[in-house]
Amino acid sequence: MAYRKRKTIGFRTEEELADAVNEIVNDSDSDTDNIPEFSSSEESESESANEIDNESNISTPGPSCRLIDVTPTTGFSKNDRQPRIPPFRDNPGVQFSVENEADVMSYFDHYIPPELTEIVVDQTNLYAQQQITKMPRPVTKHARSEEWKPVTVIKMKKFFGLIFVTGIVRKPKLELYWSMRGIFQTPIFPQTMSRNRFQFIQRYLHFSDNNAAGTNEDHLYKIRTILDIVVNNLRTNYIPDRDISLDEGMLGWWGRL
């Protein structure tokens, strides 16, 4: 906070001025010319002194009294600077070729190869067996766990295909995909797999062995093997163009709208 300095005219304080006036009045032998006059030059000198005092607020202590450089160092500038963008030398697009472009599975196998599907099949069957073993015995005659049959690679691919369709054909409940009502009917679902079979696979779907987790510090250890394969295939099989647009859902953001 800047404090207003007391204005001095010829004297340092008002008390000194009062003492000088009383001394002159009480001295009968003194001449009235001895009363000091307040000249404009003294006023300008006092104002310049005040300006110097104000400037001293931003000076560093020491004999040199060097002024501090208050130029912002944030890197911002009024002048536009052209960013340095490295040249784009990649060949964008799909990085593999297929014999029959109409064959959807040819593209599917490049991104989700058979070895990945086999890992999912093995871990799903293992997890299903582990869970069924933990169930109390004896089980009832009509228990759904008794209906479980090990899943195969073909069945798992069909399961993945139906999952992809649910992203295109949206319905409020999963059971409606097998509904026989005309307004909800989706023939590809009952023709591909029964509802109970689909729910069984969805229930026991797994990507790693829980017993082999140990004290793994990787929070994504349950999907790490699958994730590494998918990410590597995406980087290898497709290169995006030079100009891409990122949706806000792809980046972490903790603000408010």
Image (spheres, rainbow, N blue to C red):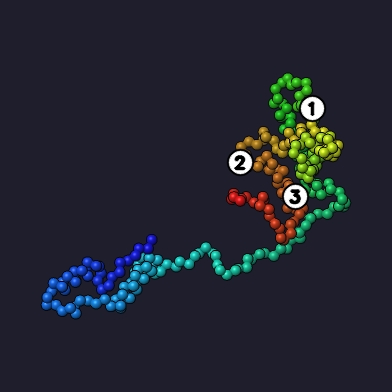
> Which mark identifies residue 59?
none
Q: Residue at x 76, y 44 (%)?
A: 167
**Left of 119 or right of it: where is 101?**
right
Q: Crowding near pointer 3: few (<14 within 10 Å), some, many (20+)?
A: some
Disc 2, disc 3: CB below 8 Å?
A: no
Q: In 3D space, how far apart are the residues under numbered discs 3 and 1 (Cα atoms)?
A: 36 Å
Question: In the rendered view of the protein, which quadrant contains the N terminus?
Answer: bottom left
Q: Earlier in the sequence, mark 2 or mark 3?
A: 2
Q: Residue at x 15, y 79 (%)?
A: 31
Amino acid type assigned to the residue bearing label 3 in the image = Asn
Amino acid type assigned to the residue bearing label 2 in the image = Glu
Q: Quadrant of residue 161?
A: top right
Please provide percent x and percent y for residue 165: 79, 43
Q: Residue at x 64, y 51 (%)?
A: 251
Please say if 212 is above or below 1.
above
Residue at disc 3, secondary structure: helix
Q: Earlier in the sequence, mark 3 or mark 1?
A: 1
**Left of 182 or right of it: where is 68?**
left
* Residue that numbered label 3 is attached to: 233
* Residue that numbered label 1 is attached to: 147
Q: In 3D space, how far apart are the residues under numbered discs 2 and 1 (Cα atoms)?
A: 36 Å
Residue at disc 2, secondary structure: loop
Q: Crowding near pointer 2: few (<14 within 10 Å), some, many (20+)?
A: few
* Residue that numbered label 2 is attached to: 217
Q: In 3D space, how far apart are the residues under numbered discs 2 and 3 (Cα atoms)?
A: 25 Å
